[in-house]
Image: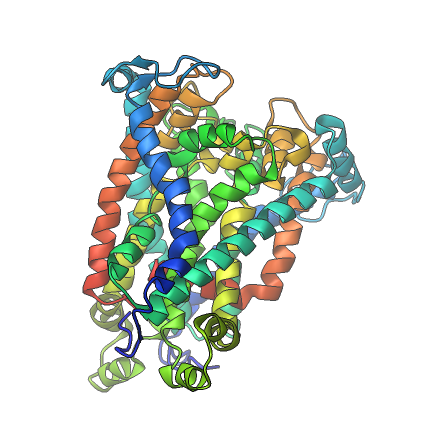
Amino acid sequence: MQSSNRLAAGGGWTPYAYLTPALLVFLVFVFTPVVFSLTLSLYQFTGFDSNLFRKFVGAGNYRILFADKYFWVSIRNTLYFVAASISVQVAIALFLAIIIFIGRFRFATLIRMIIFFPGVLAPVAVSLAWRRMLEQDGVINRILGGIDFSWLSSVQLAIWCVIFVSIWQWVGYNLVIFYAGLQSLDIQLLEAADVDGANWGVKINRIIVPLLGPTILLNVILNLIGSFRVFDIVYVLTRGGPVHYSEVLTTLMYYYSFSSNGPNSMGVGASIAVIIFAVVLMLGFLRVRLIRRDGGAS
Amino acid sequence: MRESYGIDRRRNPGFFALSRVVVAVTLVCILGPILYIFSLSIRTERTVYQDTLLLIPKEVTHQNYPKAWNLAKDRLGVDFLEMFRNSVVVTVCSIALAIAVAVLSAFSFSHFRFKGKEALFSTIIASCVVPAQVLLIPLFFIMVRLKVLNTYLAVILPYVGFCVPIATLILRSFFEQIPYEIKEAAIIDGARNSQILLRVVLPLSASALATCIILLFLETWNEFLYAMVFLQKPVFQTIPVAIAKIAGGRFQLPLGTYGAAIMITILPVLVIFVVFQKWFVAGVTMGALKG
């Protein structure tokens, strides 16, 4: 990030002129909407034809939200998502990256590309495929020995199915980042360990994993922030159902504000948006500080 | 092979074998679902429920593909080509606009010294972490006010908003790696700032631009929520929205057609991925490390 000191000095307004389009985009499509959201969450939505800011209700929307049992369910589910994606998903990716890296595979690149491939597909297409497979007469039950279970209609298991599909799709993404970290690893350290007679267990636990520390942290933070963005997979796989038991914050927001069978209360929707925003902003600060600290983590 | 260091087959036969098993199982888990959907898409109506675990069914047909193609026309009044066109228009315009804006701002950040530079940079970068969903409701009203709802602009404008920060970040760090001596030569020749950007910086940045384009492509091509809410008229629908409506609706679809519809959306991305795979990896890695 450190640039040379020989930058064109000043140039008066020129640098600002070059920045204008970006700042305009930021102002209109990020800053204004965030402020708008904050304000909107304090008003009751009274319909599309009227003035948006007619009925001030203060914390009213938040009160409605906190009284909604399914808001807490969606918080719980979002936390499940966070927990699984920063632990299981990162662990699988790390494990696979190391195995592929030290395994001397002839088609190492191809293997990585295949595992990464689901990550470039539309989550919608991935979810449609898995929805069919998880159906009562689907192929998953067939593989499990002909059991008769409707995975996505289970109050307890629906959200875990969604999380499973999410891990399936994104584990390759973490793997690619881990692999980049491994490739910048100093092999001589491992060779030095060989001289000392270290076996692979020691080399992985004592050298590779500790050296990948910053990359692990990076993946954890990426998945953490990513968990709050999940929408498509939940929407297509379960629509938040059965009832609302697999709802996450984003889908609940959609349900409250836009869904055709929802209450159409944009105010409550906006208050969910504000809550997501607050959480993610905190995490974002954390990330910026961590990246600053180890200077790009690369 | 470059990674010559690794498990030795003779010294660690057990570990060596284990690594093969692990990777084989992983590949089956990843490829299985994709191959299963492909297998579904070439099955006849009689064989969709027969030997589900067999990859190649006893009766093979390609009829599901034209059926899925026509189904889109029947159900939504839009055929796949039009959806494809919509996706291309939205993606290309968003990326082109976002890159243009980001090139200018990245150049400003990398070439000049000015007051408030790092503060402005941090402000723009901070929006990388804001989830798009948070802005959905306010942007909806903004699009209504701008009278662009149900036009391509309704999604292009928000996409540009989401893409500019990450593109600025990547391009700035790349522009800063360009040696000053190269720019200096141009400055001595009397080149203006705009000429330095167009004649010196941009020609040297082809790989950074390609990386950026791929990263933004992933963000916009697969985007679902905004496309669903802001483009409600079927004629404007992008592929993810249309496929969710065709196959994800409440009505039952013949399974073969269902599989074919999914395959039709997967195939173009597969082709692009195979051709540009290096850039995909670079894009994801850079986006993660720099973002």
Q: Does residue A209 appear to the left or right of A265 in the view shown?
A: left
Residue A83: percent from left, percent from top: 28, 42
Quarter the N terminus of chain A occupies: bottom left
Nearer-the-camera pick, B26 or B278 = B278
Residue A149: percent from left, percent from top: 49, 27
Q: Does residue B191 appear to the left or right of A219 in the view shown?
A: right
Q: Which residue is at a point 53% across and 53% down the rendered structure image?
A: B97
Quarter the C terminus of chain A occupies: bottom left
| Image: A235 above or below A203 | above
Nearer-the-camera pick, B91 or B151 = B151
Residue B45: percent from left, percent from top: 76, 33
| Image: B79 above or below B7 | above
Q: Which residue is at a point 37% across and 74% down the rendered structure image?
A: A183
Q: Does residue B252 appear to the left or right of B126 in the view shown?
A: right
| Image: B175 above or below A131 | below
Hey, which quadrant is residue B148 in on the image? top right
Nearer-the-camera pick, B161 or B233 = B161
Hey, which quadrant is residue A230 in on the image? top left
| Image: B32 above or below B169 | above
Q: Is residue B103 visible?
A: yes
